[in-house]
Amino acid sequence: MSNYIEEFEKNNQAKLDYPDVGVGDLVVLHKEINEGKKTRIQRFQGMIVKETGRFSRYSITIRKIVDGIGVEKTFVMASPLIKQVDVLTRGKGRRARLNYLRNRKGKAALRVKKA
């Protein structure tokens, strides 16, 4: 049954033209924000700390530090609101989830070995 679902999702998913991103990468994600009648593009720059799902349900969680406070947002990559993803640096994440970064402060909160 699950093979049928995977084949269906592969055939019917929208073609995503984003670069291959992974845990530990420092990325800039451009998302369209609707405010009343106006739309604008908002940038969210941070490190990918988690990946979940596959195909059309693929999502990433990005963490950044704002005024000394950690902020995490989860983005569904198949969303039409995501306009662009830029990879600034590639990181070598040796775990599937980088939850240990939550206990770090300052520059060390985004320090992962470079790939």
Image (cartoon, rainbow, N blue to C red):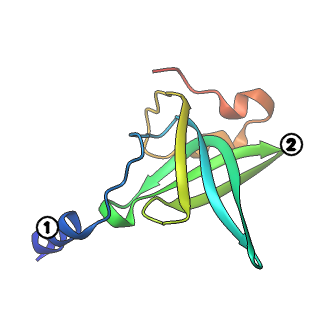
Q: Residue at x 65, y 41 (%)?
A: 46
The picture places residue 39, in percent across and down from the top left corner, at 71, 67
* 106 with respect to 75 (left or right): right
Report which quarter residue 58 is drawn in. Answer: bottom left
Q: Position of residue 98 (x, y in %)?
A: 54, 42
For the N terminus, give its image quadrant.
bottom left
Name the residue carrying label 2.
Answer: 68
Left or right of 61? Residue 95 is: left
Which residue lies at the image location 69% right of the left edge and 66% below the top edge? 33
Q: Secondary structure at mark 1?
A: helix
Look at label 2 and name its amino acid.
Gly
- Which residue in the protein does label 1 denote? 7
Position of 36 with respect to 72 (left or right) is: right
- As drawn, the residue found furthest toward the right would be 67
* Quarter of the image where one finds residue 31: bottom right
Extreme-front residue of the structure: 37
Task: Please say if 10 is above or below 67.
Answer: below
Q: Secondary structure at mark 2?
A: loop
First in residue order: circle 1 vs circle 2: 1
Above or below residue 3? Residue 26 is above
Judging depth in this view, the residue of 90 and 13 nearest the camera is 13
Q: Position of residue 26 (x, y in %)?
A: 58, 34
